[in-house]
Image: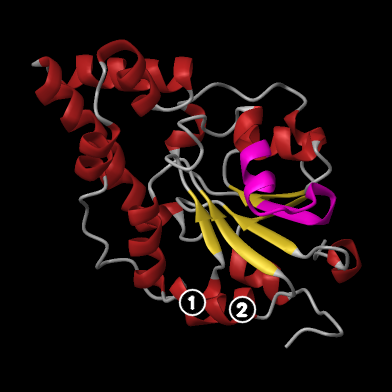
Amino acid sequence: MPPRAADFQAVDFWVFDLDNTLYPASSGLFAQIDERMRAFVRTRFGVGDEEARAIQKGYYRRYGTTLNGLMSEHGVDPHEFLGFVHDIDVSELAPNPKLAERITALPGRKVVFTNGSNAHAERVARQLGLAHCFDGVMDIFALGFKPKPQAEAYDKLFGHFAADPKRAVLFEDLPRNLIPAHKLGVTTVLVTGDHPWRHDGPPAPPDYADFIHHETDDLSSFLGELRFENAT
């Protein structure tokens, strides 16, 4: 069933996850990040790839991000870690002018909400041709290293932008990150994609579907279905 514009008429705050949401998982971009995280762990601890993966994913499941685990247990500098893992090739990521057009046309403010860094978000957005579409970025530094899906992350987002959750929508590729938003009254949209990282982190509860209002495998097409009387 296509989305109904009526479901979004009250929305004036549009929140977009970055990785595997604004671009498809099939692009392979996040696969580069995943490998860079594993390489950082290999080098830092002098271990092989299999052990590095176990450390990386173990911290992801326990702390919400690999970075939080490394910071908490080993005092890793977040600037060093994120600078390394986001040093990737984005040139294969195709610009998406249609998505840019449709995000720009949405009535109200548009922001990126990411467990990554602002620098990474800006670089990816520029490559996609989306940099001009957003009014701000809420990154892991601004979140005080309280990542999604911790409740503090959502409180920080809506407090910083002085936005009403009940007039907001969140587009996300990880179901567990939609649950706290739904509880605040946010309209939730799951952007689906077949990628392994969805299953690497803390699992969503069995009833996670109850927290998802809409689902799409094509963000641009989904936004294109929406029509607003006063949209520019």
Q: Quadrant of residue 65?
A: top left
In this rendering, the answer to whether 158 lies above or below 60 is below
Residue under label 2:
104
- Mark 1 Cα-neighbour bin, 10 Å: few <14, some 14–19, many ≥20: few
**What residue is shown at x 64% (from left), y 56% (from top)?**
15
Q: Quadrant of residue 205?
A: top right
**What residue is shown at x 39% (from left), y 76% (from top)?**
95
- Give the x, y percent position of residue 98: 54, 81
Q: Tell me the magenta residue range.
A: 155-170
- Label 2 sits on what residue type? Thr
Task: Residue at the far top: name it.
Answer: 73
- Give the x, y percent position of residue 165: 78, 48
**What residue is shown at x 64% (from left), y 25% (from top)?**
204
- Give the x, y percent position of residue 221: 65, 71
Query: Is-magenta flag for residue 157?
Result: yes
Q: How is the image coloured?
A: secondary structure
- Label 1 sits on what residue type? His
In this rendering, the answer to whether 222 lies above or below 159 is below
In this rendering, the answer to whether 128 lies above or below 177 is below
Q: Is 231 situated left or right of 51 in this image?
A: right
Residue under label 1:
132
Q: Is 202 situated left or right of 41 in this image?
A: right
- Of helix, strand and loop, which one carries label 1? helix
